[in-house]
Image: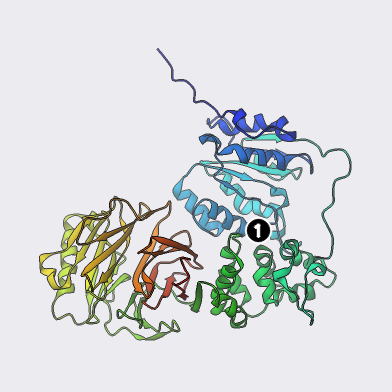
Amino acid sequence: MSTAPAPAGPDIAAWPPLEGAAAAHGPALLNWAADTSPKRPRVCLVRGARGSGKSQLLAWFLMGSAGHPRTVVHAAVLAEGMLTDAFAWELGRQLGYGPLSPTRLLDRLVVDQRPLLLLVPDLHRSGRGPADLPPARPATLVEELLVPLLELPGTRAIVEVGDSGLLDDWAHTASVETLHVGDAPSGPLAEPPTADLMAQVPRTRDGRPLWDQAPQAAREHALDRALLAPDSQQAVRALLTDPGYLLYGSSVSIAACLADERIPAPPGLRSTWRLAAPQLSNTEHDTAERAALLHAAALGTSPGLARYLLPLAEAHVFTAVWARPDAVITALAQVTAGQGELFAADPLGDVTLLDPATGLSSAPAPFLPPSSARPHGIAVHRDGSLLLLTDTGTLHPTGDDPTGVLDHIATHHGQAALKNPVVIPSAIGQCLRSGTTVVGDEQGNVHVWDRAAHYTGPRARALHAAPITAVTCLAFPDDGHTLVMSAAMDGTVRLWETSAEPMPVPVEQRPALVTSLAATDTADGPVLAVAWNDATLHLWHLPTSRMRQVPLLVPCRALALSPDSHLTVAGPDGAYALSLDTGRLWD
């Protein structure tokens, strides 16, 4: 009787050269990472004094880890100077979820049950903000997020704890493996610089700091040093009231200060920062994008800051027009084919008209939905009548529809769902120019209804192998073509020109979910907007297949895109509108 050979481990010879601490401890760390058997501890603690080579060891491991399936690091989050929230934002980004709060991140990981190998350097140097508050202590990150992460059954982690004793109490109840890298090298260690960071910031003739010209160290640590200054209250206030520092300074340090209610802050700044900080903490955003994001967040909460940032934001490819942090919207739809009012539905089932220039409700919808309806999608017809998709998958026609088209569509899908529950409607869209209605269902089918020939039934195609999450369409009157776009829970976005067969491959596929779609024909060509559940929006220029990514400030559940490139983003945490420079978006 033969036995299957044990799976081959990683070849250490294929990794970077072994030097210093890596030469002494690299093989042991590699053996731990490659052994995924249940008997091996899922957590490896890297201990050692400052200067002993811990960072060198972890850098060596990270550089070579991608070369073998069992050693691939799924996320490496440097914990130095991190708050619990900031650590969660960065970990969520690296795992493909977008910047999530600690609670939401843990919830996602519990549901996904994905196997993870995490690398956490410098846990013992985590924490930020006033020293007498919990966020400044590394133990807070450990208790609030790291221990819950380590207790997930699929999580393995390499955690650098120095000689701090962090995780010792937890290690008494859990199985861990420990690498003692060693003591500090002989001789004095270099001390961190203590220079006056504010003295390094260039200033205007009248003494205003020029943060755009400041050294990176000053941008990153000026607020941390201000908290330690003898006149700390005045020093911190000077920075929190300086719009230039808010734009260029450390978003994590600012978040740590604003979490302390004892520290005075300009009106609305705390609300602005709660909205903007998750995106501003992403170091990949350049200055123009940071300005546009902070301006959008400040519009509804901090008008003075928004006015300061407006010239910078207007130079970017997207600029916020209005923001309503108080708005909770589940569905949006254009009233007409041109720029005009929007229909907006809320969780209580109310449908109102929104002014696209201000985001304010101008009036209730002319036709009230049934009291039991909770709209999650709206299709608008040229006569003003609506077809609502509710959270239960029911289609409700409202308004004056003398032809009975909407009743016919609702009845058709209601009867089909009674016969086969998997074809229950899950998404709805509308071509205002042509009067075409598009319905997606839980089985992955897309149904296209021609208003003039509704009596013949829809044209239907199975475009996806998973439930549809969003649909939209775009009509081209000159050639009579209609382009249908759909997205599903398999992470795909597909295009179908209805006079031909659907495209054989997706336009896009990602390990995320599309939450909303919108399309329109702009002066620079047709554009498709795709909102994903990882807080990103993809704008596609359909004639050239070019794509531009836009970070989102709120989870998006509804989109509306007008021909003059006015994009409205809405969801459970608020709504805002962007003016898009489509002439520059894809340069």
Name the outermost residue toward the right: 187
Quarter occupied by the N terminus: top left
Q: For the point 68% across and 64% down, which residue is it?
A: 250
Q: For the point 60% across and 70% down, which residue is it?
A: 273
Q: Is residue 393 visible?
A: no
Residue 147 locus on image (x, y percent)? 61, 47
Residue 37 locus on image (x, y percent)? 53, 30
Q: How many marks?
A: 1
Residue 101 locus on image (x, y percent)? 55, 60
Query: Image check: 565 left or right of 200?
Result: left
Depth check, front residue: 14 or 131? 14
Query: Image check: 299 left or right of 20?
Result: left
Q: Residues within 10 Å of mark 1 (few under 14, many from 20)?
A: many
Name the outermost residue toward the left: 456
- The quadrant in which residue 73 appears is top right
Q: What kind of residue is marked 1?
A: Leu
Q: In terms of secondary structure, where does tag 1 sit?
A: loop
- The quadrant in which residue 46 appears is top right
Q: Is residue 141 visible?
A: yes
Q: Height in image: 1 above or below 128?
A: above
Depth check, front residue: 524 or 507? 524
Q: For the point 36% across and 81% down, which residue is it?
A: 339
Instruction: Give the colour scheme shown.
Output: rainbow
Depth check, front residue: 381 or 152? 381
Q: For the point 80% across and 69% down, which residue is it?
A: 198
Residue 540 locus on image (x, y percent)? 40, 64
Query: Image check: 552 left or right of 258?
Result: left
Residue at which label 1 appears: 83
